[in-house]
Image: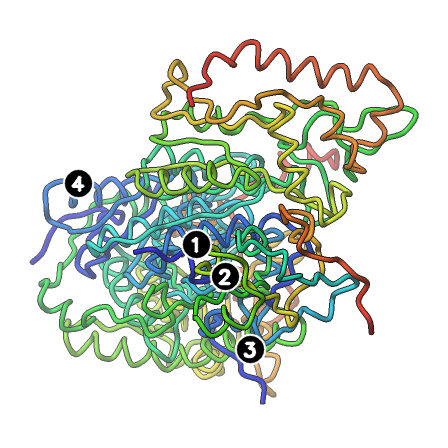
Amino acid sequence: MKVMIRGNESIAYAFKLARVQVVPAYPITPSTLVPEKISEFIANGEMKAEFVPVESEHSAMSAAIGASAKGVRVGTATASQGLALMHEVLFIASGMRLPIVMGIGNRALSAPINIWCDHQDMMSQRDTGWMQFYAESNQEGLDLGIMAFKIAEDERVLLPAMVGIDAFVLTHTVEPVELPEQKDVDDFLGEFVPHYVTLDPQNPATLGSFGFPEHFMEFKYGQWIAMERAKKVIDEVFEEFEERFGRKYMKVYPEFVEDADIILVTMGSMTSTTREFVRRLREQGKKVGLVKLTVFRPFPKEELREILKNAKVVAVVERNISFGFGGAVYAELSSTFSRMKEKPKVVDFIVGLGGRDITFNTLNSVVEIAEKAMHEEVDEVNWIDVNKEAVLKAEGLL
Amino acid sequence: MEVITRGAVIPEPGNSVENKTGTWRVFKPIIHYEKCIRCLICWQFCPEPAILLYEDEETKKKTPAPKEPLKRLPVVEIDYDYCKGCGICYNECPVNAIEFVKEEK
Amino acid sequence: MNYEKEEFFAPGHGMCAGCAAPIIVRWILKLAGPNTIVTNATGCLEVATTAYPRTSWRVPWIHVAFENAAAVASGIDAAFKAKGEKVNIIAFGGDGGTVDIGMQALSGMVERGHNVLYVLYDNEAYMNTGIQRSGATPWGAWTTTSKVGSANPIGKLRPKKPIAKIIAAHDAPYVATANPAFFNDFKKKVKKALSVEGPKFLHVLSSCTTGWRHDPSKTIEILRLATDTGLFPLYEIENGDFENMRITYKPKKFKPVEEYLKPQGRFRHLFKNPEYIKKLQKDVDEWWAKYGKYYRP
């Protein structure tokens, strides 16, 4: 059934169709509509679940761990400051190997406070041991939301997962979304079976023990193995999803790359703009390609090496920054290439922070510098569409 | 071989019994059964717990029997495998039936 | 079913010899029975009883972090409701994890009305990290972050945070203070709490031989003095009805506060100045002058 819904509703529908049983959540722009929609589903009997209106995001994740440990399917949603507030608990959720799924309305982190789209929030959590997926559209938000449960709950994985939908551009924008039938999702996901030790008075176990140096690293290695195995599980789930629902997902989705000299790497909603831009460049005869990164954790090193190996320049277009270094995708991609004898030049482009629009002009600037990079040295990290003069003045440099 | 579980769960309840904390003792409580009135206060307050409770007739017979009706009450025994020698039992016994002596190593 | 002869808390743990916390926990588990789930904040109790691969717990138990035992319990409560199953959920937290960093999660849990018994085992400082002051540390106590010296001869300068009253002010169905030295009163309150639907809170005084600097054999004796001097009164408040608060024990003859303070090294410095002892006695006398009328045996 095709519906016209916002990105936030996609996440809510994913939870509803996945028959999530407990949703502990706290409101924050732009993800607030997720718990609101869940509350609506429950109130009118469409969803049988317990909604826990917790008093902070830290408690949202804590309650999610408690519920998941009992052995029920759990989902929550947050963004930006809320995600940052949960930080310590995120490590605990993955350390305890609980398959919690969380929707993130990708939003900038303060200061200054900003409610609009960028990837700093989710990117800052990439070390937490959570799988990370970035949606290009509301359809992807729904589909990835549903698939996240199947991947996370797989006995070979048992790691929590976050699905990012861009603030306002997706969370609040109405798009046509194909809603799968409940029975088809039931078939796809199956009934929730916890493949892990739960809180059960019939089998009393201790969860969250104290790990001394004699054992701690082994537990961490277990998480590492799980992430590695997740790579295969993700491919399997993507494939099964395509068979059942007809929509194709890939960890790394290449378009126009066959003979491309320059390939742009994007994540999230900016991919739609970039695709159209690249199509037009191709019409002009320019050899430019596009690669969408849907899965950021586990980082698809093998696929990226394979798909990008023949490009002369890889332009990483990203909405996050690690001050003192550069963008995270640039960092990880560059180190992924470091093992290759022949490798493309990687150039970093910082764009669209705090909701700044990414337009064809933005992408023109990117491609201009990328073209230059084919023959000469360019800056490693390039901030695009920024009023640099005003800033340099404020910093006392002009 | 060291057993590692996923998520560091400990599936075996109460397996701390493998750790005999009786080695901690510097002082040791000794129950003088001829004085014991079987009030169970020592058993009640033991933090480990390292005081065992016996209700079977055989064990009750083995300990010096107080008069009726106390004979019917459970008998306590200090579990020296776990007793840390805190002395709470010695301090709380209402009839001073527990002696507190230096542990001999 | 009566589980009093069964042990749901196993020996072999690393709690200090003479610690009151395991006495409290052991009995609460007996009274709750095996159909119980425990959440535990980071602290002495959690750390000393669950060093991988050994655990002292014979009921399902979960530890997540320092400040969220109440939030984790809330999630478990929601999950059981979602499955339509019944269970006792008990959250254990020290004063650190309850009164300070755990305040938010506890307040939220009570406000939302989760069916959870929160037990505060109050040893009046952050003991597990080495005796630092908490909001529950009483006035005049030495701790490593309220040290005593020429510039500060008192130690902690602020009074004890009245946590039981704060939770009672949330209109929680059942709030009580309890003391394991007053064993029957303690048992009665635990049973009562477990029989009530909704969020209940037990503030239990728990002496610490290491942090209070006292002879381990005197644990129960010192706890008894806390209440017999009137310093730690035992009362119940139901549904926020302060007007009908019930003091459940009143000493026939109050012992002077010095008797409680003297055996504890953390108060030794107070004896340098009789004014300090007088102040503490005055505080106690004033409290009982004001609230003594609520004694209802």
Contact between marks 2 and 1 (CB within 8 A): the answer is yes
In the rendered image, residue A283, in percent from the top left (x then y), is placed at 31, 67
In the rendered image, residue C11, in percent from the top left (x then y), is placed at 57, 65
Residue C9 numbered mark, or none:
2
Residue lying at the far bottom of the rendered structure:
B1
Give the residue pinned by disc 3.
Answer: A221
Do discs 3 and 2 share a chain? Answer: no
Q: How many marks?
A: 4
Label 2 secondary element:
loop
Foreground residue, A328 or A152?
A152
Comparing marks 1 and 3, which lies closer to the viewer? 1
Residue C180 numbered mark, or none:
none
Q: Amino acid at mark 4?
A: Glu
Please report the residue visible at 70 percent of the width from the left and 54 percent of the height from the top: B87
Q: Amino acid at mark 3?
A: Tyr
Do discs 4 and 1 share a chain? Answer: no
Label 4 secondary element:
helix
Quadrant the N terminus of chain C occupies: bottom left
Foreground residue, A159 or A29?
A159
Q: Measure the C-alpha gap from mark 2 to mark 1.
A: 7 Å
Q: Measure the C-alpha gap from mark 1 to mark 3.
A: 35 Å
Contact between marks 4 and 1 (CB within 8 A): the answer is no
Q: Amino acid at mark 2?
A: Phe
Q: Measure the C-alpha gap from mark 2 to mark 4.
A: 43 Å
Confirm whether residue C74 shows in the render.
yes
